[in-house]
């Protein structure tokens, strides 16, 4: 298995916060291999989200080097770029392109998106008339269509009612079980234990431990 | 920064979305795109023709030509200055080459301006300035001004997030340029060395060229257009370089 993504002594600092220690992340080294699912755990403020933002190429590190074998890396976000004055269909188009698809691909997937989001004819109403649940369902349905080489997931994306949450959770789990290379940040220990091949434990801006999910989770719980 | 086909698709769809929001936001909707220059026209006509009695024959056409082409430049540049901030939610979640953001603004303004331009051509035709052979040079002028609009828009879009204080300077600068571009007076009436200084302003050259072409049926001096085009290309290169240089810096600056 080849490394799709390599972090070499990567550091990130936000100069205007954290008196004393300005480094949000420091001395981060790891490889993400093709096809694996990597879990990231750690307390709030440990730098998990910053790590994902660095991986996705949204921001550049202040120290070290990040090597990428692909530029098809997506930090999954739902309702990306949604605007109230546009219809569900128009928003799905813009959101889909933002998530890395071509217009033709979004068009081809539109029926599937509408069905998954359970919107029916309301897809052509302005999104400002939607309930929060409808918006979330449409956002998730579009995000499901994205096919990046590396999928980055920050926390459980739970939207809609109980039935839809179960449906979206099942969909994500299937993606993780497939050949999809993925990084999952989550507080859900069961999810990490069941779905991840390896786990990184972040603490105080550094990697405290990295390895088998069961071992790391056991240390983490202590 | 790698540009792809889907980026062009994104610019197109986001520009359409901008237009749609414009037309949704007010009861008169798209009509405002036309009303806006007309209201300016009435204001200046009232001041210069009616009150100060300095307009002279053909003043309405002189004024309207200046306003139509000035508004294209002005609204593109002013809105582009805010373009990266406008999409801060998106660029904090997904990577986009930042150069796309001012290009969305430029594109939606181009679409609006096209509509205004068609109506303006219709107005000229019906009011005694029918299309002549000189109009064949119009695409050249359009292209020249477009390059200038792109250049100025990219540059302010790149700089404002880096130094937000400059926004005020851009506002003052645009107002100053408005008064110095000869929109409601003829720059050729200015004598002495000041005149050549005023004509360093690319918009002064453009407005002059448009009036010569549309109202005087004469062709613009190629050297003048070459100067504007050259300046536009330099600004474009500089703006694009800055946007690329700080591509990954902007999400942290505006959020």
Image (cartoon, coloured by chain):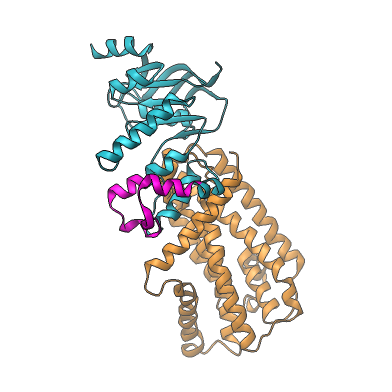
Q: Quadrant of residue A164?
A: top left
- Residue B137 coordinates in the image, percent (x, y): 74, 71
Report whether B124 appears left or right of B158.
Answer: right
Residue segment shown in magenta: A109-137
Seen in the picture, residue B21 relative to A190 is either above or below; the reply is below
Q: Quadrant of the N terminus of chain B?
A: top right
Magenta segment's dominant SS is helix
Q: Which residue is rendered at x = 55% and y = 45% of the image?
A: A102
- Residue B179 coordinates in the image, percent (x, y): 53, 71
Note the chain letter of the cyan one. Answer: A
Give the colour chain B carries in the figure: orange
Q: Quadrant of the C terminus of chain B?
A: top left
Seen in the picture, residue A175 relative to B97 is either above or below; the reply is above
- Residue A150 coordinates in the image, percent (x, y): 49, 29
Q: Which residue is rendered at x = 56% and y = 48% of the image?
A: A104
Q: Is residue A81 visible?
A: no
- Residue A4 coordinates in the image, percent (x, y): 54, 22
Q: Which residue is rendered at x = 57% and y = 25% of the image?
A: A69
Q: Quadrant of residue B232?
A: bottom right
Report whether B104 appears left or right of A176.
Answer: right
Report whether B184 appears left or right of A153.
Answer: right
Which of B89 and A10 lies nearest the eye of the viewer?
Answer: B89
Which of A184 and B29 lies nearest the eye of the viewer?
Answer: A184
Is-magenta flag for residue B208?
no
Report whether B223 appears left or right of B149.
Answer: right
Seen in the picture, residue B169 relative to B39 is either above or below; the reply is above
Q: Is residue B45 visible?
A: yes
């Amino acid at each position: 298995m080849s490394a799709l993504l390599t972090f070499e002594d990567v550091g990130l600092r936000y100069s205007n916060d954290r008196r004393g220690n300005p480094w949000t992340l420091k001395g981060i080294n790891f490889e993400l291999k093709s096809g694996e699912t990597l879990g990231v755990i750690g307390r709030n403020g440990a730098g998990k989200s910053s790590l994902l933002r660095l991986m996705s190429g949204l921001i550049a590190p202040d120290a070290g080097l990040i090597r990428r074998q692909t530029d098809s890396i997506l930090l999954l976000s739902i309702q990306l770029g949604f605007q109230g004055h546009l219809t569900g269909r128009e928003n799905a188009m813009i959101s889909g392109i933002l998530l890395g698809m071509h217009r033709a691909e979004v068009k081809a997937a539109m029926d599937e998106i509408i069905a998954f989001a359970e919107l029916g004819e309301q897809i052509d109403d302005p999104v400002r008339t939607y309930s929060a649940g409808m918006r979330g369902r449409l956002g998730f349905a579009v995000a499901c269509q994205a096919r990046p080489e590396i999928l980055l997931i920050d926390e459980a994306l739970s939207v809609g009612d109980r039935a839809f949450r179960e449906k979206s959770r099942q969909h994500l789990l299937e993606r993780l079980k497939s050949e999809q290379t993925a990084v999952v940040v989550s507080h859900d220990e069961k999810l990490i234990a069941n779905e991840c091949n390896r786990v990184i434990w972040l603490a105080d801006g550094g990697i405290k431990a990295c390895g088998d999910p069961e071992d790391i989770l056991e240390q983490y719980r202590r | 920064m790698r540009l792809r086909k889907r980026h062009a698709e994104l610019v197109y769809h986001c520009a359409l979305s901008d237009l749609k929001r414009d037309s949704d936001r007010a009861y008169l909707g798209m009509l405002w795109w036309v009303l806006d220059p007309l209201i300016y026209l009435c204001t200046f006509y009232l001041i210069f023709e009616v009150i100060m009695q300095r307009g002279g024959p053909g003043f309405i056409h002189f004024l309207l030509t200046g306003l139509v082409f000035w508004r294209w430049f002005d609204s593109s540049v002013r809105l582009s200055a805010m373009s990266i901030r406008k999409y801060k939610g998106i660029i904090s979640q997904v990577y986009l080459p930042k150069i796309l953001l001012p290009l969305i603004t430029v594109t939606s303004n181009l679409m609006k301006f096209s509509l205004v331009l068609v109506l303006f051509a219709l107005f000229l035709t019906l009011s005694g300035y029918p299309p002549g052979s000189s109009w064949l040079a119009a695409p050249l002028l359009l292209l020249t001004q477009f390059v200038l609009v792109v250049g100025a828009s990219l540059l302010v879009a790149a700089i404002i997030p880096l130094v937000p204080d400059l926004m005020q300077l851009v506002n003052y600068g645009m107002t100053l340029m408005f008064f110095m571009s000869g929109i409601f007076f003829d720059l050729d009436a200015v004598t002495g060395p000041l005149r050549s200084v005023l004509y360093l302003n690319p918009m002064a050259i453009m407005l002059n060229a448009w009036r010569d072409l549309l109202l005087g049926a004469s062709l613009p001096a190629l050297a003048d257009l070459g100067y504007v085009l050259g300046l536009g290309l330099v600004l474009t290169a500089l703006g694009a370089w800055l946007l690329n240089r700080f591509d990954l810096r902007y999400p942290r600056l505006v959020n």
